Each structure stands twice: as C-alpha cells, then as structure tokens.
C-alpha cells in the first residue's frame, strides 16, 4: 500500500461522510418542507419553519461536537454542559449590554462594549471556569467527574438566580479608567433583557455587509414577501451563519483529533495508564482538552441565547445537557461527523419533531380543546371515549418529548451504544495499518494470523 | 531538632498541598466568624440550634434515601441518576393514597388520586397531618415504600438487567434516560405545579428552650425522626443478623467470586432493590410530609445532595450514607450563617467536592459495611 492508496482512502472516507451528511440533511429538510405544505404554509411560514429547524440543527451540532471532544476523544464524562453555556452567554451579555442610562427599560445595565468583545469575553470566561473545574476534578474517576460537573452546572444556575449577584454598583473609575457602566449584575430570577443590537447585525456590520444585506431584504420585500420580511430573512441568514460555525467547529475538532495532540487524547480514552507509561503527561492533555471543549460550549451557548430578547436562569436547567448527550450518543461518540449528524437528527426528530407531529395531527383532525388534566382525560377513557385522552397526550407533547428522549436513550444504550457512526477506527498512525487486500487469495488458505478475517 | 522537623514538615505541606492549606484557612475563618458572632450577639444561639435541628432532619432524609443509592452503587457498580426520581415517584404514589383516605367523600376520587393536580383539591383543606389524619399518613408512607419497590424492580427487570455486565458508565447514561422518562411521565400524570400537602397550621408544636431563646419542634419533625431512625435500625439489624448482608458485602467486593461461592447474585440484586427502593420511597414521602410541599423536581433536587452524602460516607457503606447525609444536611442548613441563603445547596456541593479531592474514598475510609 502506497501513500497514494492511503490518500485515496482518506478522500473516499471524506466523500462518504460529506455525502452522508448531505443526504441526511436533505431528507430532514424535504420532510419539513412537505409538512409545511400539508399545513398550507405560505412562503413566510416555510422559511420560518426552516430557519427554526436550521437554528436547532446548528446549535445541537455545535454542542455535540464540543462534547465529542470531551467524551468521544478524551473520555471525560462531562454532564455540566449547560453550566458552561450559561457562563458564556451571561458574561457576553453583561459585557455587551448598554449602561442603564442608555438602556432605558432594562434595570440592570452592562458595560456597553461591542458584541465582539462580549463574545470573546464569554468564551474566555467559559474556558476559565472549565479550568477551575478541571484542575481539581480531572484526577477523579469518570462517575465522580460526572457528579462534580453536574453539581457545578447547578451551582452556576443558583448563582444566576441569587439575589446576591442581582446587581452590582460599578465604581466610577477603575484604575483610572472611566467606565460607562453604572449598575451591572446577573439579574437574579428575572434574568437579563438583551437590549443590544442583534448578533447578526453586529456580525454583518463588522464585515461591511450590513447595507448590502438591507438591500437584499428590500429585494425580498418587493418581490417575495410583501409584509415586513426582515425577521424571516434574519432567521434564515442566522441559521446559515450557525451552519458555517458548525463547519468551523468540525474543521477545528477534526484537525485537533488528527494532530499529535489528538492522538494522545484518544490514547487517554483507550487506556490512560498506557498513555502515562509512554511518557505523556496525561493530566495536562486532559486539562487542555477539557478547557478547549468548555470554550466551545461557551460559544455554543452564546450563539444559542445571545440573539434572544432575554435570558432567564430556568433556560439553563440540566435538561439541555441531557439533550446534548442524547444528540452525541445518537450520532456516536468519537466521530465528528457522527456528532454533527446526531445533533441534526436529534434536533429534527426528537426536539422539534414531536411539535410538528402534534401540529400535523391537529391539522388533519379537528379535535378541539382537550381536557385540562390527566384526571379528566382518564375519566373519559373510563366511559369508553379515548379521544380526550388522545388530545391530552397531544397537548402534553412538550413534556412527553422528554419521556420519548429518555426511552430512546435507554434503547440506544441497549441496542446500539456506539450510535450511528461511533467507535469508528481512527487509526493513530501516519502509515496504512490495514491488512493487505486478499481478495484474490483462496478463502481456504491456511491462516497465519489465527484465522481472523478482516 | 523538634523545631526544625516541624518546620520541614510544615514546608512540605505548603508545597505539596496548597489546596489543603486554603481549605484549612477557610475552616478557621468560619469558626472564628461564628465564635465572634456568638460572642458579639450578631448570631443567636437559638438560631444556630434551629438550623442544626433543621439540618439534622434534612440529613436524615438524605441519609435514608442515600442507603439505597449507596447499595446499588456498590453492588451494581453504577451511579444511579434515576434515584432522585424514584423519590419523587414514591412521594406521589404515597400522597395519592393519603389524599384519597383523608379526602374520601369531600372531593372526587380523580382529583384526590392526582394529588390535587391543577389546584382541584388542597392538602391543607383536607386537614392532612400526622395528628389530624394519622391513618391516611401511615397508609401513605407504606404505599410509598411498596410502590417504589415495585417501580425499582420493574425498571431493573426491563432496563438494567439486560445490560448488567456493561461498564458503569453505560449504566450511568442509561439511568439518566430512566430519570428523564420517569420524571416527565410523572409530569404528564400529575402536572408541573408545586402543591401544598399538609395543613401546616394544625400541626402540634413544642418550643424547646435553648440558651437565649427557643427552638420550635413540630409533630412532623418528630415523626420524621422516629420513622427514619427506626428504618435505619431495621436495616442495620437486617444486614448484620442475616446472611443477606454478608452476601451483599461479598458481591460488592467481587461479583464473580461471589457467584462461584454459590451466592445467588440475582437474588441479592433483587434484595438490594427491594431494601433500597423501600427506604427511598418512604424517605420521599416523609420529606414531603416534613416540608409540606410536593413538586415533580423534589427528588432531582435532593439527588445531588444524596450523591454528596454517599460519596462523603464512602460508597457501599450504609452507615457512611447516614453519617454523610447528616453532615450534608447540617452543612446545607447551617451554611446560611456564612453565605447567602441561596447558596446553601451550593455549600453542600462544595463540601462534597472538597471531600472528593482529599478523601475520595469517603471520610469513613471507604469500608463497605453494607
């Protein structure tokens, strides 16, 4: 086997992955567009639904990729994902929110710095807290690390909710610098109102694309959607930006995974003692991997929430961590392509799917308002009328969604713990280690390798 | 010579364990803060006593529920994240029965069985309390235990048994799936609202004098104390006097060896779920009786404290779980002396993290005394 053969194989693998991703995405989008057709959506409705779907595919893809660095590559069992997301977005908003005097409606102000500074600050803060958690915790067993990380994410949520950190008075001058900020804080249980220009606008302005973009929106308004098309176009374009960022995550993590650094990470995942015995300072490698993953999770959190009108602590419950884990396990830990696919399938099928299913059923059958509680639903079943129970089930779909996810997770762990693409052999070698092709050799030839077939 | 030896040892400590020094300094500061506060009258003795009492009761619940977690952790070798939702399930099943018995004839059966979902019936209006409706409370506690045992056995049969030989992490991830499925099934049936369950105004109370004031003790406090200590003693006797305890210890040590020796491992596992599930269900019921509210997140919020307690006491040791539970409960309650009240739980987590760093086998040395 020569180097060209290897290159062909790699290229082949890449093609297959790209093809697979495109095929899965195509199926998902076609199904959603068809569902839109059934609902009788206008173009605006279709674009809205697609923008929404793309948004969730983007964020879950991103977070699953970041988690894959922890769990898939390094074997770090982090179930505090949402904590790092929350730190990222809260720090970003505190840095970026205008000071109170300018903000008006919002009671808690910020430092009023550009969004780019805020994003960098948020990512750095997430990385810093990752370091803080990792320094003591990485020495622990996997299950202890799990408990520490989830406890950490709950502490983060309590901190967001606490009255102690609700507001701070910022001194007029710090180290001789006159700060615009007056009162800053985390906003307590009421959360923070994100009264700064939308991330999309900030991004396009930095790239000097804002005026062309407005021109494009005007074009859409005069030709396609007559009435105020900007929110719709914003949504679609933001979704595309997210997909672009997913691409960057994918490139960064694949590059990391193939680098010597990444090979050590995989060695740690397989057997930390061996990696240690080979002279690798495994703690240092784990630390770096953990911090990088946390930074990426922080960025994921920022991209998810920074475009919303406001953020509140209940958004940062451990449920989100659970979602990201399911996405990763569906896709398959250890494979970047799998992580993204898992994120996409999770977003389309389990996260958004049940809601669409409900709308679909409601569009098909006119069921009216269902019973308000389980008791009324069961009472009707008692009198041999299953319809109210069915309607109650449909109306509770946002809760049952989590039941479905739980069952899917159990099923996966029973039947396919490696997910769609997980545990794929990623050879940690620069030369080809595969067996020579023996297609032309007779099948019954004496086996010199213990009789194993490739 | 003595001085230089001390100096060398001190320097080695500073270099080797800077974190230990920091933790030690924080501990010293806390002790000084409390002593100075008590001396200056900033902190009242009876307030501290009330916090200790509250912490002890909270700790008993954590310990009681922790016994089951500790046992499954050491015998089945995985951290069961669905344990918190067993607590919630036990509480809901028990309280459904209590509502039914206390409110039969006053409200329709459906609302009673759903523990007043959507504000259809209120526990306070039914006059539920250990003195006002003792039979309903006793029956509820028993049903909570039995229902949780049944739930634990069914889930074990369907979910955990097929993957018994997988790694602890596989089982852990699976248990997270179980936790969410169970929690949101409970939401599906009982709704998301947090309901008041007891007629708080009608609970008899006594004032116990302490140095500069009094500490209030209610009948529900006393019930919790009696029930939990009684159950703990019962488990202690069961595991010390029967062969089951020995079999469990053998299994948590080495499962293969235990099987070769002729221990029916599956039967031991079943016994583990029965004991652990029963205690967990009763703990959930008593927790709700004691605090007077019931919501679908109760068990989950308690779970991390239970993990803290179990790790603190050393996995596999029921005495460790009880001791750890009391330490964690007292920490969570008394921490308000030093930090804002929102961080009580966070303080308990910090204690757990510190223990994990310095004594990952628990403060009782990780002896499995099951």
Image (cartoon, helix red, strand yellow):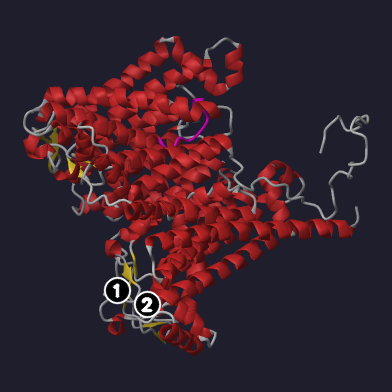
Residue B52 in the image, given as x and y percentages of width and height: 25, 39
Tell me which residue sits at (63%, 62%) in the image. Answer: A250
Q: Which residue is mark 1?
A: A108
Magenta residues: mostly which secondary structure?
loop
In front of the other: B295 or A143: B295
Pointer 2 and pointer 1: residues touching (CB < 8 Å)? yes
Quote the CA–CA distance across marks 2 and 1.
9 Å
N-terminal-most mark, 2 or 1:
2
Does residue B306 appear to the left or right of A81 in the view shown?
left
Residue A98 in the image, given as x and y percentages of width and height: 35, 81
In front of the other: A131 or A265: A265
The span shown in magenta is: B73-82
Residue A444 in the image, given as x and y percentages of width and height: 91, 29
Does residue B360 appear to the left or right of B107 in the view shown?
right
The C terminus of chain B is located in which quarter? top left
Label total for image: 2
Q: Which residue is mark 2?
A: A97
In front of the other: B216 or B38: B216
Among the 4 quarters of the image, the one containing residue B71: top left
Residue B225 in the image, given as x and y percentages of width and height: 23, 28
Which chain is home to disc 1?
A
Q: Element at badge 2?
A: loop
Which chain is home to disc 2?
A
Is residue B77 highlighted in magenta? yes
Is residue A343 highlighted in magenta? no
């Amino acid at each position: 086997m020569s180097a060209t053969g290897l290159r062909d194989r790699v290229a082949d693998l890449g093609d297959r992955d790209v093809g697979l991703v495109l095929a899965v995405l195509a199926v998902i989008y076609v199904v959603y567009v068809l569902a839109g057709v059934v609902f009788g959506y206008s173009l605006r409705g279709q674009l809205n639904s697609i923008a929404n779907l793309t948004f969730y595919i983007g964020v879950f893809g991103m977070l699953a990729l970041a988690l894959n660095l922890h769990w898939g590559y390094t074997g770090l069992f982090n179930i505090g994902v949402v904590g790092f997301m929350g730190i990222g977005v809260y720090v970003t908003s505190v840095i970026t929110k205008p000071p109170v005097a300018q903000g008006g409606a919002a009671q808690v102000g910020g430092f009023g710095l550009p969004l780019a500074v805020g994003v960098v600050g948020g990512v750095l803060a997430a990385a810093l807290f990752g370091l803080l958690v990792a320094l003591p915790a990485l020495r622990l067993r996997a299950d202890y690390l799990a408990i520490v990380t989830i406890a950490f994410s709950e502490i983060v949520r309590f901190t967001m909710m606490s009255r102690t950190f609700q507001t701070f008075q910022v001194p007029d001058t710090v180290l001789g610098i006159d700060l615009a900020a007056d009162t800053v804080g985390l906003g307590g249980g009421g959360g923070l109102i994100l009264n700064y220009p939308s991330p999309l606008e900030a991004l396009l302005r930095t790239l000097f694309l804002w005026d062309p973009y407005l021109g494009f929106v005007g074009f859409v308004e005069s030709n396609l959607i007559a009435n105020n098309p900007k929110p719709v176009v914003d949504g679609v374009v933001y979704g595309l930006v997210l997909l672009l960022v997913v691409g960057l995550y994918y490139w960064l993590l694949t590059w990391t995974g193939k680098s010597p650094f990444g090979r050590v990470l995989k060695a740690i995942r397989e057997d930390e003692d061996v990696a240690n015995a080979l002279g690798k300072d495994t703690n240092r490698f784990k630390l770096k991997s953990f911090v990088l993953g946390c930074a990426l999770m922080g960025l994921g959190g920022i991209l998810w929430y920074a475009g919303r009108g406001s953020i509140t602590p209940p958004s940062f419950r451990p449920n989100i961590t659970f979602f990201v884990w399911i996405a990763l396990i569906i896709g398959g830990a250890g494979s970047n392509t799998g992580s993204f696919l898992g994120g996409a399938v999770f977003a389309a099928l389990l996260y958004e799917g049940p809601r669409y299913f409900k709308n679909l059923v409601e569009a098909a059958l006119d069921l009216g308002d269902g019973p308000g509680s389980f008791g009324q639903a069961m009472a009707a079943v008692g009198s041999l009328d299953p319809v109210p129970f069915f309607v109650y089930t449909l109306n509770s779909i946002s809760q049952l969604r989590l039941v479905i996810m739980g069952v899917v997770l159990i099923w996966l762990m029973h039947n396919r713990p490696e997910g769609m693409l997980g545990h794929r052999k990623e050879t940690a070698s620069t030369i080809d280690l595969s067996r020579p092709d023996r297609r032309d050799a007779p099948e019954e030839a004496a086996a010199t390798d213990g009789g194993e077939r490739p | 010579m003595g001085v230089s030896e001390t100096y060398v040892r001190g320097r080695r400590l500073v270099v080797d364990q800077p974190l230990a020094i920091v933790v030690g300094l924080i501990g010293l500061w806390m002790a000084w803060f409390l002593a100075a506060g008590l001396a200056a009258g900033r902190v009242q003795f009876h307030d501290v006593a009330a916090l200790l009492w509250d912490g002890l009761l909270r700790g008993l619940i954590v310990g009681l529920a922790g016994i089951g977690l500790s046992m499954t952790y050491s015998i089945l070798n995985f951290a069961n994240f669905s344990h918190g939702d067993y607590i919630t399930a036990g509480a809901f099943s028990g309280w459904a029965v209590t509502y039914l018995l206390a409110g039969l004839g006053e409200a329709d059966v459906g609302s009673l069985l759903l523990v007043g979902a959507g504000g259809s019936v209120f526990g306070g209006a039914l006059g539920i309390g250990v003195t006002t409706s003792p039979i309903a409370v006793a029956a509820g506690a028993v049903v909570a235990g039995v229902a949780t045992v049944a739930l634990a056995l069914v889930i074990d049969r369907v979910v955990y048994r097929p993957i018994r030989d997988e790694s602890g992490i596989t089982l852990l991830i699976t248990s997270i799936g179980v936790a969410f499925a169970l929690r949101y099934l409970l939401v599906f049936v009982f709704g998301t609202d947090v309901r008041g369950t007891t007629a708080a105004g009608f609970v008899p109370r006594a004032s116990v004098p302490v140095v500069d004031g009094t500490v209030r003790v209610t009948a529900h406090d006393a019930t919790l104390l009696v029930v939990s200590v009684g159950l703990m003693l019962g488990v202690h006797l069961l595991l010390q006097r029967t062969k089951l305890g020995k079999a469990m210890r053998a299994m948590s040590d080495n499962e293969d060896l235990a099987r070769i020796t002729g221990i029916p491992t599956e039967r031991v596992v079943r016994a583990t779920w029965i004991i652990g599930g029963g205690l967990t269900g009763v703990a959930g019921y008593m927790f709700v009786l004691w605090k007077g509210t019931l919501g679908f997140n109760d068990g989950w919020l308690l779970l991390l404290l239970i993990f803290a307690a179990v790790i603190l006491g050393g996995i596999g040791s029921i005495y460790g779980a009880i001791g750890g539970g009391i330490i964690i409960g007292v920490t969570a309650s008394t921490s308000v002396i030093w930090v804002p009240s929102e961080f009580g739980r966070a303080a308990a987590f910090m204690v757990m993290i510190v223990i994990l760093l310095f004594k990952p086998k628990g403060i009782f040395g990780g002896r499995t005394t099951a």
